[in-house]
Amino acid sequence: MDPGSTCSRPGQLALVLATLLATPAGALEAYTIAGDAIPAPLGGEIGDPARGRALVLDRTRGNCLICHRVPVPDEPFQGTIGPPLAGVGARLTAGQLRLRLVDTSLLNPETVMPPYFRTEGLRDVAPQFRGLPALNAQEIEDVVAYLVSLRTP
Amino acid sequence: MTTRAALFIGLSLAATMVSAQEIKPGSAFLSPEMLRQQSDEARNPGFLWVEQGGELFSRRSGGAPACIACHAGPERSLKGAATRYPQVDAASGKLLNLEGRIEQCRTQRQNEPAFGYESPELLGLTAYVASFSRGLPMAVATEGAAKPYLEAGKAFYERRQGQLNLSCRQCHDGLVGEKLRGDTISHGIGTGYPAYRLEWNGVGSLHRRLRACSLGVRATQFDYGAPDYLALELYLAARAKGLPLESPGLRR
């Protein structure tokens, strides 16, 4: 269930490939890791970049701007914690972006970037968020579609 | 894989360097204008709460003696008191912060009902008592009976929590000086509390600030005065040892 537990050491990642088995009701959609990417869309969903952009800006959903700068000039107060996302679609493939959203700790156990598609191995989660991923499969695909569109550094 | 290994070594070195860095007071992260305003009693709105606390301090309530009956000349007798909280209460063995001590005086010595956390009365009295320690170095006890509480607070500070899976330390050691939205991340020591926050339009306690950070990472918010936050408060105060108490602070 916890994708992190199958691939928690970086060395294992290079070798690829935890295929996760079909999951019980209420659990997160299964995905397959290849290298540093999740090549296939989660749950086979098709992402919409406009919805993704809204999720990235929404303080109650992605809230990515607490940490990242995005090429949206009329958004004041963008964070400086993570790398700027301008041009990220040229630097990383959709599959690489997907893995980084799902759970960057698979690549860097010390990371500050939150796992947006994980419910296991978290502690003291506030009751209203318990058992839920920060973004669902459709929303992850929407955000991936938006990030892919950010091609100019 | 070798690059990744190198990256990890790089990261852990960076982490060691960060933890060795000098911890700065919250005011070091204020804009020059807010810093001037915090220092100026006439322009720092927190002093309204201090004033109201001062009135309560000398007022009798019911048949009970006023605080000043036991603490005459508070600017001398309570000077530095706030720098030593939280501390373990000798009688009960429990960890008490300044709010807890004031409530204890209220209920046990004045035989009056507790004011309650975040009531204007308790905030005023806490800010008033803390104001006699403005500029004095934090000096909490961390050995003996305090030690287990300190360790619990440290463990809380260091563990990842909430849906966003972040620890206090990741932000308040690792990302100090970075911008989180419009805020500049400080060392998170809380020596300005009770503080006037623009976002609150008023004075609030340290535990109110801690609840905001918990909510920020979508973690359980503990109750005001909960043992978890008390232990955390002791750890923050220990990190701040030697730094000046700044209450009433002025914050965004």
Image (cartoon, rainbow, N blue to C red):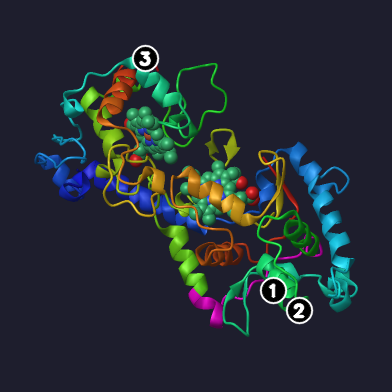
Residue type marked 3: Ala
Badge 3 and badge 2 in a common chain? no
Judge from the rendering whether residue B199 lies leftward or rightward of residue A86; answer left or right.
Answer: right
Residue drawn at 73 percent across, 57 percent down: B123
Residue drawn at 43 percent across, 64 percent down: B155
Q: Is residue B112 above or below residue B51?
A: below
Badge number at residue B109:
2
Residue type marked 1: Gln
- The residue carrying mark 1 is B104
- The residue carrying mark 3 is A50
Which is nearer the eye, B120 or A38?
A: B120
Numbered disc 2: secondary structure: helix
Q: Which residues are magenta?
A: B131-148
Numbered disc 3: secondary structure: helix
Cβ atoms at labels 1 and 2 below 8 Å apart: yes
Query: Is residue A150 in view?
Result: no
Q: Residue furthest bottom?
A: B91
Q: Position of residue B161 (x, y in %)?
A: 40, 52
Q: Position of residue A67 (x, y in %)?
A: 46, 34
Q: Position of residue B166 (x, y in %)?
A: 41, 48
Q: Alpha carbon of mark 1 to alpha carbon of mark 3: how far?
A: 56 Å
Which is nearer the eye, B187 or A25?
A: A25
Q: Alpha carbon of mark 3 to alpha carbon of mark 2: how far?
A: 63 Å
